[in-house]
Amino acid sequence: MRPEWAADLCVWEVTLACNARCVHCGSDAGKVRPSELSPQEAIELCDALARIGVRHVTLSGGEPLMRQDWPALVRRLVGHGLRVEMITNGLCVDEAAAHEIAGSGLASVTLSIDGTEEVHDELRGVPGAWRLAKQAVASLRAQGLQVGAVTQVNRANLGCLAEIEQTLVEWGIGGWQLQLTVPMGRCEQHPELALEPAEVPAVMDFILGSSRPIPLYAADNIGWMLPSEPRIRSANRPTDRFYAGCQAGLRVIGITSDGTVRGCLSMPPEFNEGNVRLRPLEEIWNDPKAFAYNRCFRQEELSGACAACAFRRICRAGCKTIAFASTGQTSHNPFCALALDSAQVRARLR
């Protein structure tokens, strides 16, 4: 039996360095983070992840390919029997890089695709970024790799999701995830990009559209507890899977490139739990007082619509990151699909 707090997934920012300048970046990536883990420290972290029972690791950034020793990290993790994936912007994935990626042991690669050619290049701050991403997909698929895509949905691309989907079909993408842009990091300087709660139902309607040509998944900052929830979580396939609440510190762990530990990499510094340079990862993870927002959750802490919701024990006010970024607290969540749907019903009855 798996322990109560079993870190199935680690999302690891291996470097904050990035060759793009995305206006919607939640990390404000660009320059190397001060005091990033050394190659030896990173290898030791790979071993520690295996010891706490992690099964899946997603290498993120910044741009993970800008960390020179990334192949060694992949090999170390795979050597422990972990499944390793990578999220990249594709800017430096030519045929040679694709060959190296294929030989590294990575199980799959996901590219960030945030719009049509014009929208993508504008959001990414790099002229030609879309064409380079297209070439990256072709090079990776030529090596036999599984290639997916992830799109941050915001006001710049909400109206072109269907066009993005058609592009991904033409490129041969195997799966697509949508997640909401959160006003954090560099996006704090562009708050007009982030969707308001009232705009989210349009995203849900798109996800639930019939006959999707490729599997389409909603990230955990979209949805929660509507009758359509199983379809949102399962690429519109028959299932009984429901959103099980924020898994930060329960089944998920995030680690920044300087060794800082959070329940979820997307969370802001207010949710830091420690640093592997100061305290072993096992001690941080197994500390019963850590990740208290989920591990020590009490229904009495909820407020607003969440306090009276029938699903409050399970949902726990949804995604903590988007709640905190939009309201400064995690006791209620204005992005709840169930609450938004109820509000629409009440409005129609007036």
Image (spheres, grey):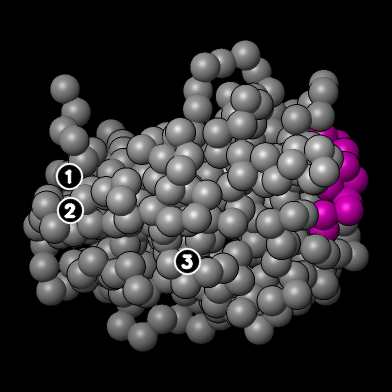
* Count of all numbered marks drawn on residues in the image: 3
Using the image as rendered, state which of residue 36 and residue 345 is in the foreground: 345
**Is residue 164 rendered magenta in the image?**
yes
Q: Amino acid at mark 2?
A: Trp
Classify residue 290 by image quadrant.
bottom left
Q: Which mark is residue 52?
A: 1
Q: Amino acid at mark 1?
A: Ile
Sequence-wise first label, 3 or 1? 1
Nearer to us of marks 2 and 3 is: 3
Nearer to us of marks 3 and 1 is: 3
Residue 215: where, in percent of width, then height?
69, 28
Chief SS of the magenta region:
helix
Residue range corresponding to the magenta coloring: 157-170
Q: Residue at x 16, y 72 (%)?
A: 277
Q: In the shown orientation, is residue 285 left or right of residue 157? A: left
Whole-number angstrom distance, CA of label 3 to CA of label 1:
28 Å
Sequence-wise first label, 1 or 2? 1
Residue 48: where, in percent of width, then height?
17, 52
The residue singled out by tag 3 in the image is 324
